[in-house]
Amino acid sequence: MAASVFVGLVLLVAGAAKLRQPEWPASAAAFGAPRRLATAIPWIEVAVGALLVTSVGLPWTAMAAAGLLLAFTAMVALRLLLGQPVPCGCFGETSSRPVGFDTLARNVVLLLAALAAAITGRGGGGPVSVVAGVAAAVAFVLAARSRA
């Protein structure tokens, strides 16, 4: 359960931050996302994140999160391979700092956690598991936002 809470909270924070940021569609466009998809991404993150935090639909919601994170990771890797470092906007802010290998590593960690949640495929785990997931998510988001 710690993995699903961890990934779920990170997705909730990322989606909510994008919804609060009017420049988010422009950041997504810099990555090559179609405008319609760019406006849907934050809502998808919020929905999948909420389902993960509440353990609804596991393991399917964890697999959906893994798919979403795989797409994000692939886009970051592509931009790095093409030498087109664009601002991340991952947590809604429009940073002048381009994506880097730390962004790629962060996405891989999230992807692996989503896969772990999909493999374990069940909720439960008790309060210690929830606290561990929340603590990991808070530390992760704070570290990611300090890069901006």
Image (cartoon, rainbow, N blue to C red):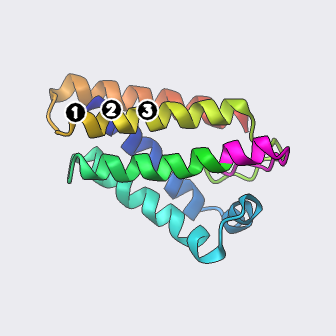
Quick one: 48 or 117, which is closer to the camera?
117
* Badge 3 amino acid: Leu
Q: Position of residue 6 (x, y in %)?
A: 38, 35
Q: Which residue is mark 3?
A: 112
Label 3: state its secondary structure: helix
Quick one: 107 or 2, which is closer to the camera?
107
Name which residue lies at 32% across and 46% down.
62
Look at the numbered discs 2 and 1 and tell me whether their residues touch, using CB distance below 8 Å: yes
Q: Position of residue 18 (x, y in %)?
A: 59, 59
Q: Mark 1: give few (<14), some (14-19) or many (20+) Cα within 10 Å.
A: some
Label 1: state its secondary structure: helix
**32 relative to 1 in the view: left or right:** right
Mark 1 and mark 3 lie on one chain; the one further toward the N terminus is 3
Q: Which residue is mark 2?
A: 116
Name which residue lies at 21% across and 47% down.
58
Instruction: Inspect this view and state whether residue 118 appears.
Output: yes
Q: Which residue is mark 1?
A: 120
Q: Mark 2: give few (<14), some (14-19) or many (20+) Cα within 10 Å.
A: some
State yes or no: residue 37 in magenta: no
Cα distance in 3D space between marks 2 and 1 = 6 Å
* Badge 1 amino acid: Thr
Name which residue lies at 20% across and 39% down.
121
Look at the numbered discs 2 and 3 and tell me whether their residues touch, using CB distance below 8 Å: yes
Label 2: state its secondary structure: helix
Quick one: 135 or 103, which is closer to the camera?
103
Q: Which residues are magenta?
A: 76-89
Cα distance in 3D space between marks 1 and 3 = 12 Å
Cα distance in 3D space between marks 2 and 3 = 6 Å
**89 relative to 64 in the view: left or right:** right
